Amino acid sequence: MSNHRHVIEASGAPAPAGPYSHGVVAGGLLFCSGQIALDPAGELVAGSAAEEATVCLRNLSEVCRAAGTRLEDAVRLTVYLADLVADAPVVNDVYASFFSEVAGALPARAAVGVTALPRGAQVMIDAVVALPD
């Protein structure tokens, strides 16, 4: 593996559901693969979009921990929703609980409505996170 790119495997997150890594570090950033609401055994957590978003963000937090950073240091997240109109408000509430609005700490974000997500999930979230200096 080259020294400009480092693969992150997070033991605290469910194993990737396909041929990809939990994350890749390059250029002072951690690029996290999209997370759906999988429990540690790799099973989709049944529940509301809010419950799924909570699991997604917890799994992303584990990927960040494995890379030596924190989800709070995210610079950009993308939230994919199977029902953007109905689920955006409740997912926003969960999202806000993971980030501080103090001193402009909220990361940039995009929300995308999609027709389907892997394993029938309602929510998937990916992230780009700054590494500590």
Image: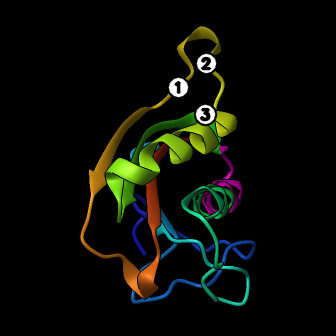
Along the viewing direction, whichever of 67 and 133 lies nearer the viewer: 67
Callouts 3 and 1 close, C-beta under 8 Å: no
Q: Against 5, is 40 above or below?
A: below
The kind of residue tagged 1 is Leu
Please give the label number shown on residue 106. Answer: 1
Question: Which numbered tag is attached to residue 96?
Answer: 3
Query: Which label's residue is closer to the chain start, 3 or 1?
Result: 3
In magenta, the rendered stretch is: 59-70
What residue do we see at 65% from left, 13% from top?
Answer: 102
Q: Amino acid at mark 3?
A: Ala
Return the x and y of residue 21 as percentages of the image width and height: 47, 76
Q: 45 or 7, which lies in front?
A: 45
Q: Quadrant of the N terminus?
A: bottom left
Mark 3 residue element: helix
Q: Quadrant of the C terminus?
A: top right
Q: Main secondary structure of the magenta part?
A: helix
Which percent across, then down, holds residue 19? 39, 89
Whole-Å distance between the Cαs marked 2 and 1? 6 Å
Real-space Cα separation, disc 3 to disc 1, in angstroms = 8 Å
CB within 8 Å, label 2 to label 3: yes
Residue situated in front as seen by the camera: 32 or 125: 125
Q: Earlier in the sequence, mark 2 or mark 3?
A: 3
Residue farthest to the top, as pictured: 103
Percent coordinates x, y for residue 47 in the rendering = 64, 71
Q: Amino acid at mark 2?
A: Glu
Which residue is labeled 2 in the image?
101
Closer to viewer: mark 3 or mark 1: 3
Is 73 situated above or below 65? Answer: above
**Contact, CB < 8 Å: mark 2 with mark 1?**
yes
Report the disc number at residue 78. none
Mark 2, other Cα within 10 Å: few <14 / some 14–19 / many ≥20: few
